[in-house]
Image: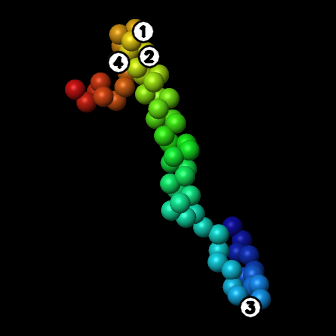
């Protein structure tokens, strides 16, 4: 990536854009949690319909 010229507004230097802890938290909540819930529900559905356990908890035993 090419470095951009430093921008100033009224003499104040603007910070470079970066990922904040809040952005990481929101990404986890909006993406991670739904994927975990859907994956767990599909594993449970598969186990109830076929009797085959495919979840990580099956390999822990």
Residue that carries the numbered disc 1 in the rendered image: 49
Q: Is residue 28 left or right of residue 49?
A: right
Q: Is residue 12 left or right of residue 42?
A: right
Mark toward the start of the polypeptide (4 vs 3):
3
> Is mark 2 in CB contact (under 8 Å) with mark 1?
yes
Q: Tag 3: Cα neighbours inside 10 Å, few (<14), some, or many (≥20)?
A: few
Q: Is residue 37 left or right of residue 31?
A: left
Nearest-to-viewer mark from 1 and 4: 1
Residue 21, percent from left and from top? 51, 62
Mark toward the start of the polypeptide (4 vs 2):
2
Residue that carries the numbered disc 4 in the rendered image: 53
3D distance between C-alphas at marks 4 and 2:
10 Å
**Structure colour scheme:** rainbow
3D distance between C-alphas at marks 3 and 2:
60 Å
Q: Tag 2: Cα neighbours inside 10 Å, few (<14), some, or many (≥20)?
A: some
Q: Secondary structure at mark 4?
A: loop
Name the quadrant of the C terminus: top left
Q: Is residue 51 above or below residue 3?
A: above
Q: Is residue 57 above or below residue 50?
A: below
Mark toward the start of the polypeptide (1 vs 3):
3
Mark toward the start of the polypeptide (3 vs 2):
3
Q: Secondary structure at mark 1?
A: helix
Q: Is residue 17 left or right of residue 21?
A: right
Name the quadrant of the N terminus: bottom right
Residue that carries the numbered disc 3 in the rendered image: 11
- The residue positioned 70% from the left and 87% from the top of the image is 12
Residue 6, percent from left and from top? 72, 82
- The residue positioned 34% from the left and 29% from the top of the image is 56
Label disc, if present, on residue 45 of the rendered structure: 2
């Amino acid at each position: 990536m090419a470095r951009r010229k430093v921008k100033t507004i009224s003499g104040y230097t603007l910070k470079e854009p970066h990922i904040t802890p809040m952005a990481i938290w929101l990404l986890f909540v909006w993406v991670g949690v739904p994927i975990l819930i859907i994956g767990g529900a599909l594993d449970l559905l598969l186990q109830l319909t076929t009797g085959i356990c495919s979840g990580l908890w099956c390999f822990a035993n």
